[in-house]
Amino acid sequence: AVDMASTLQVDSDVSVDGIIEVARYFRHKGDTNTYIDFGTDSLTVVTGGSNAFAITSSQEAIAYGNVGIGTSSPTSNLNISEDGQPQVNIDSYDNTDGNQAYVNITKAAGTEASPGNVADDEAIGQLQWKGYHTDGYDIAAHIASAIDGTPGNGDMPGRLMFATTADGASSPTERMRI
């Protein structure tokens, strides 16, 4: 075993048949603000001096900034891109009746740490279908949801609005409301 209290510089390949222990950081030589930080029961990847990704002691993965799958320049919190036919699967395997896969779109006023009540006519979420033309993506259709009355504890009145864009129009028009 070698116990080092200072810097060890090796200018060739190193092969270790065992465990390498570090006090806290693995740092890239010549780029002092890019490193892996082994905090207390966590691991954080730091690039350019900012946290890029972390795994916490409760096995939560945290991405700081936008996450791209199949793209090196994500334009939203989660951007999945593929030449061809990208798919997203949410699979549920359970023998208990009533257990199923969910997609939840949630909305609250305030912040995550201190959520507040939503109000009548407040938009909750939207699914959009867009197509590319000339210089960008235009909305062909969407399904939107909103609060449809005064909400209360255990009472969340809602509506769905279905909209499509007519030929020659620049934005969707509501066609049906439930």
Image (cartoon, rainbow, N blue to C red):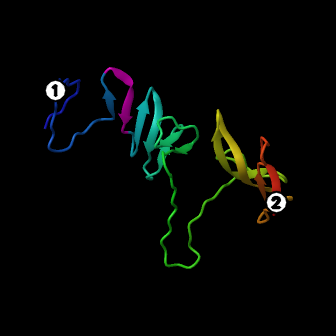
Tell me the element at label 1: loop
At a point 57% along the width and 37% down the height, the residue shown is: 75
Of labels 2 and 1, the one closer to you: 2
The residue to which callout 1 is attached is 12
As shown in the figure, which amino acid type bears the numbered disc 2?
Answer: Met
Q: Residue at x 74, y 52 (%)?
A: 124
Q: Amino acid at mark 1?
A: Ser
Q: Is residue 75 visible?
A: yes
Q: Which residue is mark 2?
A: 176
User: In the image, what residue occupies the spot 52% across and 62% down?
Assistant: 90
Q: Left of 24 or right of it: where is 51? A: right
Q: Which quadrant: the C terminus?
A: bottom right
The answer to whether 116 appears left or right of 5 in the picture is right
Nearer to us in this view, 103 or 25: 103
The N terminus, quarter of image:
top left
| Percent position of residue 125, x then y | 71, 52
Looking at the image, which is closer to me, 168 or 51? Answer: 168
Can residue 125 be seen here? The reply is no
Q: Residue at (24%, 39%) from the top-left corner? A: 21
Q: Is residue 44 above or below residue 6?
A: below
The residue segment tinted magenta is 30-38
| Pick the front one: 143 or 27 | 143
**How busy is the neighbourhood of tag 1: few (under 14 within 10 Å), some, or many (20 plus)?**
few
Verify whether residue 35 appears in magenta. Answer: yes
Kindly report the secondary structure that dominates the magenta region of the rendered protein.
strand
